[in-house]
C-alpha cells in the first residue's frame, strides 16, 4: 500500500496548492504568534514558535524542490536549494529593512513574502524563457522555493533573536554569524529530502517527513544560538522541542523507509560476517 | 535618495553579477561523472565550485577592505583569492586523478589541446568523455575563478558602501552570488570543460538572464540600510 505518489506531474497524495497554503499560513501565523506572545508577555520563551513555523515553510519548499527536480535540471538538487536560500536571504533583508524604514516592523513578514514571491516567479520566467528550460512548473516552483527559503530564514532568525526588529536581527543573527548556520541548515532542510529520496520509488510522504526531520535538527542548531542571545530558558526549550521533533519524525521516517524498501537487512561489521 | 552614487552602486552590482554569471562558464565542471573519472573537469557541481571560489574571493576582498578603501586593490584581492581557491582545488584534484585513480588527463571536446598542442583522442578511455583536468581546462578554470572573485568583490564593495555593515553586506553578496551562479549553471546544464567547450557558446543566454536578475537584486540592495 502506498499513500505517496510518483513525482513529475503524477498525482501526489498532498496537492501542491494545499501544501502551499499550509506552508504560508503556518509559517506566517507562527512567526506573528511568537512575536506577539514574546512582546505581550515580555519574555523570550516563545521564540521556539518561530523555529516551528519555519518547518511549515520547509515542507512547502521541499515539495517544490521535489516537483521541479523531478523534471531533471542537470545541475543536481543542491543547486536549487542554494538558489532558494539565496533568494530567501535577499527577500528577508529587504523585508526587514523596508518595514523598519516605514516604521512598522510587524509588517516585515508580509513585505518579505511579497518580494520573495515576485522575485522567485521572475527567476522562474527567466529560466523558462531565456535559458529555455521549458519546465511547466518552473515559475510556480521557483516562487514557492523563494517564499519557503525566505520564511524559513525569517522564522529561524526570529527564533535566535526573539524579536522582528531589524536592528535586533542584524545584531543577534548577522553580526554573530549565526546566519551562516541558518543558511546551511535551512538549505539542507529544503534540498536534502528530495536529494536523499529521489529515484523511481520516491514517495511524497517519505520525502516530506524527511524535511520535517531535518527541520527539527535545524531547530536544535538555532536553540544553541538562542542559548547565547536569549539565555538558558529560551535556548533549552528550543533544543528540547527540536530534538523531540527530530526523534519523532526520525522514527516515522524509518517506518516509511521500511514500508517502501523491498527488504531491510543488516550488512554486518567489517570484515564481512555471515548474516 | 537617487543620486549619482546610488547609480554607480547599482551598476557595480549588475556588473558584478554578470561577471559571476559569465565566469561560471569558464570553470571546468565535471559533476558526478568527473567524480568517477568518466568526464573532464572537477568532480562536483557548478554551484559548489562557484560558491567556493566566490566566498574565498569575498573573504579576500573583505580582508583587503579592512586595511584600505582603494577599489582596485580590493577587486584585485578578491580576484586573486578566488583564483587561488579554484587553482588549488584543481591542483589537488589532479593529484588524485593522476596518482590515485591513475588516469591520463585528456579532453574529449577537442582533438588538440589549444595551449600545449598535445593530441587528446588516444588518451580518452573508451566509453568516457575524457578524464582529469588538462592544461586548457586548468587555464580556463583559473580565468573563471578570477572572474567570479572579481564579481563577488565588486558586489561586496558596492554593498558595503551602501549599508556600512560588513556582516550584512557579506550575506547579501552571497545571496546575489548564488542566484547568478545557479542561473548560469542551469544554462550549461551540468557539465562544461571551459572556453573551448562547444557549450561555452551558450553564454549570451546566461548573460541576459543574469542581467535581468542582477537589475532586480541591485534595486533591492540600494533600499537596504545597515540597521542600528
Image (cartoon, rainbow, N blue to C red):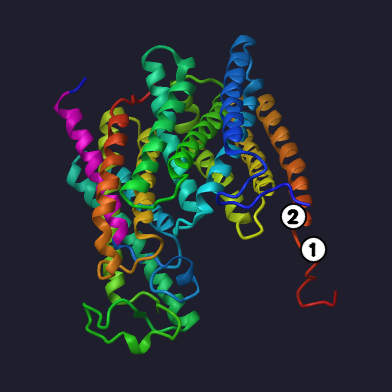
**Quarter-wise, where is residue B11 in the image?**
top left
Query: Where residue A187 appears, x then y in whole percent?
Result: 53, 44
Mark 1 vs 2: CB contact within 8 A? yes
Secondary structure, mark 1, is: loop
Q: Distance between the residues labelled 1 and 2?
A: 9 Å
Main structural element of the magenta stretch: helix, strand or loop?
helix
Residue A250 lies, in percent from the top left, at: 74, 46
User: Which sits in the foreground, A48 or A258?
Assistant: A258
Q: How crowded is mark 1: few (under 14 residues within 10 Å), some or many (20 or more)?
A: few
- Which segment is the magenta one? B3-25
Element on which disc 2 rests: helix
Q: Mark 1 lies on which chain?
A: A
Residue furthest bottom as drawn: B122
Residue A55 lies in quadrant: top right
Residue positioned 26% across, 57% down in the render: B203
Report which residue position mark 2 lands on: A257
Q: Residue at (48%, 26%) from the top-left corner?
A: A169
Residue B153 seen anywhere in this rendered image of the structure: no
Q: Is residue B20 magenta?
A: yes
Packing grade of label 2 (10 A; few <14, some 14-19, many >=20) is some
Query: Which quarter of the rendering shows the C terminus of chain B?
Result: top left
Residue receiving disc 1: A264
Q: Quadrant of residue B163?
A: top left
Position of residue B83 measured from the top left corner of the image (x, y, whole percent): 30, 60
Amino acid at each position: 500500500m502506498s499513500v505517496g505518489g510518483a513525482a513529475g506531474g503524477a498525482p501526489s497524495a498532498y496537492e501542491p496548492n494545499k501544501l502551499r497554503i499550509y506552508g504560508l499560513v503556518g509559517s506566517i501565523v507562527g512567526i506573528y504568534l511568537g512575536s506577539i506572545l514574546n512582546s505581550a508577555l515580555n519574555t523570550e520563551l516563545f521564540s521556539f514558535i518561530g523555529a516551528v513555523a519555519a518547518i511549515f515553510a520547509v515542507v512547502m519548499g521541499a515539495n517544490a524542490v521535489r516537483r521541479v527536480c523531478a523534471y531533471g535540471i542537470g545541475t543536481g538538487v543542491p543547486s536549487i536549494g542554494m538558489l532558494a536560500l539565496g533568494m530567501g536571504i535577499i527577500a528577508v533583508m529587504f523585508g526587514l529593512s523596508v518595514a523598519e524604514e516605514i516604521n512598522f516592523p510587524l509588517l516585515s513578514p508580509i513585505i518579505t513574502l511579497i518580494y520573495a514571491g515576485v522575485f522567485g516567479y521572475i527567476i522562474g520566467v527567466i529560466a523558462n524563457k531565456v535559458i529555455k528550460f521549458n519546465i511547466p512548473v518552473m515559475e510556480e516552483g521557483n516562487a514557492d522555493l523563494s517564499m519557503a527559503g525566505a520564511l524559513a530564514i525569517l522564522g529561524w532568525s526570529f527564533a535566535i533573536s526573539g524579536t522582528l526588529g531589524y536592528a535586533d536581527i542584524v545584531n543577534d543573527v548577522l553580526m554573530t554569524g549565526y546566519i551562516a548556520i541558518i543558511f546551511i541548515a535551512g538549505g539542507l532542510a529544503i534540498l536534502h529530502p528530495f536529494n536523499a529520496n529521489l529515484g523511481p520509488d520516491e514517495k511524497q510522504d517519505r520525502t516530506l517527513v524527511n524535511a520535517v526531520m531535518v527541520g527539527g535538527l535545524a531547530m536544535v542548531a538555532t536553540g544553541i544560538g538562542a542559548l547565547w542571545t536569549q539565555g538558558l530558558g529560551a535556548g533549552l526549550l528550543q533544543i528540547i522541542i527540536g530534538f523531540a521533533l527530530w526523534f519523532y519524525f526520525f522514527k516515522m521516517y524509518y517506518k516509511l523507509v521500511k514500508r517502501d524498501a523491498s527488504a531491510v537487512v543488516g550488512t554486518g561489521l567489517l570484515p564481512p560476517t555471515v548474516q | 535618495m537617487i543620486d549619482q552614487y546610488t547609480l554607480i552602486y547599482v551598476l557595480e552590482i549588475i556588473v558584478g553579477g554578470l561577471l559571476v554569471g559569465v565566469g561560471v562558464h569558464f570553470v571546468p565542471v565535471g559533476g558526478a561523472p568527473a567524480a568517477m573519472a568518466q568526464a573532464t573537469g572537477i568532480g562536483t557541481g557548478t554551484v559548489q565550485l562557484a560558491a567556493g571560489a566566490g566566498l574565498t574571493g569575498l573573504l579576500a576582498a573583505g580582508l583587503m577592505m579592512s586595511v584600505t578603501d582603494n577599489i582596485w586593490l580590493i577587486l584585485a584581492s578578491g580576484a586573486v583569492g578566488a583564483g587561488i581557491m579554484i587553482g588549488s582545488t584543481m591542483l589537488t584534484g589532479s593529484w588524485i586523478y593522476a596518482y590515485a585513480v591513475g588516469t591520463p588527463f585528456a579532453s574529449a571536446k577537442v582533438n588538440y589541446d589549444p595551449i600545449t598542442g598535445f593530441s587528446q583522442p588516444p588518451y580518452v578511455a573508451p566509453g568516457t568523455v575524457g578524464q582529469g583536468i588538462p592544461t586548457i581546462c586548468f587555464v580556463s578554470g583559473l580565468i573563471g575563478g578570477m572572474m567570479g572573485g572579481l564579481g563577488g568583490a565588486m558586489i561586496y564593495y558596492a554593498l558595503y558602501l551602501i549599508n556600512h555593515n560588513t556582516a550584512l553586506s557579506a550575506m547579501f553578496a552571497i545571496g546575489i552570488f548564488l542566484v547568478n551562479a545557479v542561473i548560469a549553471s542551469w544554462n550549461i546544464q551540468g557539465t562544461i570543460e571551459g572556453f573551448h567547450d562547444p557549450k561555452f557558446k551558450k553564454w549570451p543566454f546566461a548573460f541576459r538572464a543574469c542581467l535581468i536578475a542582477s537589475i532586480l537584486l541591485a534595486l533591492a540592495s540600494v533600499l537596504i540600510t545597515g540597521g542600528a
